[in-house]
Amino acid sequence: MSHDTATAVRRRPRSRDGLWPLLFLAPLMIGVVVFYFWPILATVLNTFATFDPFGGRSFAGLDNYRTLLSDAFVPRAVLNTAVYTAIVLLGIPIAVGIASLLTQKGLRFSRFYQVLFFLPAVSMPVAVALVWRMIFNQEFGVVNWALALVGIEGPYWISAPWWSLLAVSIVGLWSSLPLAVIILSAGLQGIPPELYEAAQLDGAGTVRQFRSVTVPLLTPSIFFLSIITAINGFQLFDLLFAMMGQANPAMADTQSLVYLFYSEAFRQNDQGYASVIALLILLIIAVLTLLQFRMQRRWVHYE
């Protein structure tokens, strides 16, 4: 048998074996195309159409994009969503402090405290929002009752534009803490104790060890949390919807981008313009994520 014939015989089984990975990956790839890429493509196509109440569509060109540029509610919705996201991101340094306390050596009932902090993450978001709505109630809420004890008249937390956004942001920050604490606690447990011992031998105190050892080695976890927190922040809807309600007079000045999308798509039945808003949300999240990945080279330490 010649060398070429032997090579062809050896290659033939490999070519058959190469089809099996594609066969096993096919269901996953079909699902990704059908449930991820096709909806995105369909949304882009819908931005160039107008829809009538009976489901018919007609070509609209760039009219929906012109409406987006002239809509006065869009800049306010973008600002509200950005403010909410920025406030929720403040929960990450708070979670770092909480996780550091929960993972201290000698802390009794540390597992119990971790479970206690994680309970809000497994609670129903609507139920959580309704409870906080009662807490921020202007007439009988706990917050205004506590402010009245020190002589401060509490604002209308849920029905005043900026106060309602602050109230929703506080609840969003509180809701983001459980997952952040769990992830950061796992990151802290992965730091070798020898590093703290070496820092202690060099004369570093507790604060210096936290700044020079704990925080740098936690930056991968912090980076991951910043990504998912920012994405979740720009998807604000259910918390805002449940706490404020559609009939709230402050909703027009407090609505997020996703709520604006919901209003246009399901209340105004303008699916073409709603698709433009959805595309805007996608682009903002993509750009923000890309910027975070580029900036992480300066402050994230993987060693």
Image (tube, rainbow, N blue to C red):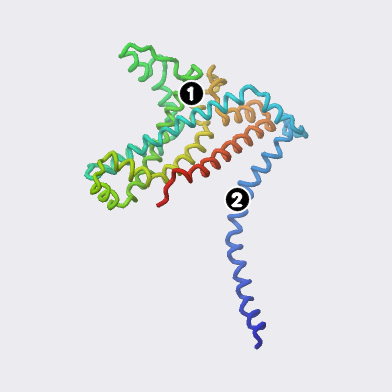
Residue found 42% across the figure and 27% down from its top:
170
On the image, the x and y values in percent for residue 299 come to 44, 43
Which image quadrant: the N terminus? bottom right
* SS class, disc 1: helix
Q: Nearer the viewer, residue 271 or 68?
A: 68
> Please, what is the three-letter code of the amino acid marked with disc 1?
Leu
User: Which is in the foreground here, disc 1 or disc 2?
Assistant: 1
Q: Nearer the viewer, residue 51 or 169?
A: 169
Q: CA distance from mark 1 to mark 2?
A: 36 Å
On the image, the x and y values in percent for residue 187 come to 36, 47
On the image, the x and y values in percent for residue 295 come to 50, 42
Residue found 23% across the figure and 49% down from its top:
201
Residue found 28% across the figure and 51% down from its top:
193
Q: Residues within 10 Å of mark 1 (few under 14, many from 20)?
A: many
Side of 270 where 89 appears, left or right: left
- Dot label at residue 16: none
Side of 89 where 113 appears, left or right: left
Q: Residues within 10 Å of mark 2 (few under 14, many from 20)?
A: few
The residue carrying mark 2 is 32
- Are the residues at dot 1 and dot 2 in contact (C-beta closer than 8 Å)? no
Depicted 226 relative to depicted 78: above or below: below
The residue carrying mark 1 is 165
Residue found 64% across the figure and 36% down from its top:
279
Depicted 285 relative to depicted 70: above or below: below
> Please, what is the three-letter code of the amino acid marked with disc 2?
Val
* SS class, disc 2: helix
On the image, the x and y values in percent for residue 41 come to 67, 43
Quadrant of res 18: bottom right
Q: Earlier in the sequence, mark 1 or mark 2?
A: 2
